[in-house]
Image: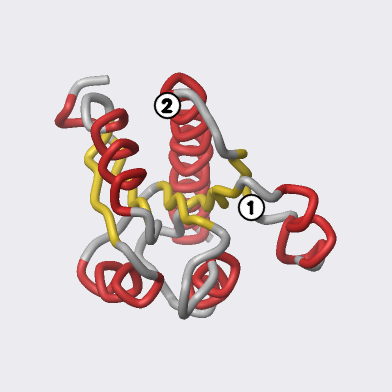
Amino acid sequence: MPHAESFRVLLVDDDIRLLESMTAVLADDFVVRSATSGYQALRLLERESFHVICADWQMPGMSGVEFFREIAQKELELTPCLILVTAHTSELLESVPYEDRKLLGMLRKPFSPEQLIERVKQFARVAQLKRSSAVLNATLGERK
């Protein structure tokens, strides 16, 4: 993917080494920003738009699900696709309501670099389709 056409990805995780590793893996194909907390990521979202956001489920202060709920309440220029990263998928399925889960992609830790790249590419394509659909709907609405 040419860098000029790259999708923007925000990574959120309190594990700095994992964050650095994920950033390095994705940097060749995407424009990547990172944050070590949901609060820091929300501040980034005030200034920048992202196509895909990957957030760890269990973080101190604000979990990934709580962070995604905050995003859902914001009116963003670009609505990002959301990927929840966790090593505890069975606990997640038990404790997070279906309504919250159905809007999320999931990536189970540990994951390979290839799995990370593929999942982010999948959701970047979905974000692109959502954006194209919104532009088409706006155009059709103007013609009425």
Q: Quadrant of residue 121?
A: top left
SS assignment at label 1: strand
* Neighbourhood count class around disc 2 (C-alpha, 10 Å): few under 14, some 14–19, many 20 upward: some
Residue type at tag 1: Leu
Which residue carries the number 1 mark?
A: 104
| 104 or 14, nearer to the observer | 14
Verify CB contact (< 8 Å) between mark 2 and mark 1: no
| 129 or 16, nearer to the observer | 16
Horizontally, residue 73 falls left or right of residue 131, namely right
Horizontally, residue 57 falls left or right of residue 127, namely right
Q: Residue at x 47, y 43 (%)?
A: 127
Q: Residue at x 45, y 19 (%)?
A: 114
Which residue carries the number 2 mark?
A: 117
Where residue 134 is drawn, which disc sits there? none
Question: How is the protein colored in the picture?
Answer: secondary structure
Q: Residue at x 47, y 74 (%)?
A: 60
Q: Quadrant of the N terminus?
A: top left
| 7 or 118, nearer to the observer | 118
From the top left corner, tell me how far across and down residue 90 is, in percent.
Answer: 79, 50
Residue type at tag 2: Ile
Q: Quadrant of residue 31?
A: top left
SS assignment at label 2: helix
From the top left corner, tell me how far across and down residue 43 is, in percent.
Answer: 27, 75
Mark 2 to mark 1: distance in Å? 17 Å
In the rendered image of this protein, does residue 32 appear above or below residue 68?
Answer: above
Q: Residue at x 50, y 71 (%)?
A: 67
From the top left corner, tell me how far across and down residue 115 is, in percent.
Answer: 51, 24
Horizontally, residue 64 falls left or right of residue 11, namely right
Say which label, 2 or 1, has the lower sequence index.
1
| 44 or 76, nearer to the observer | 44
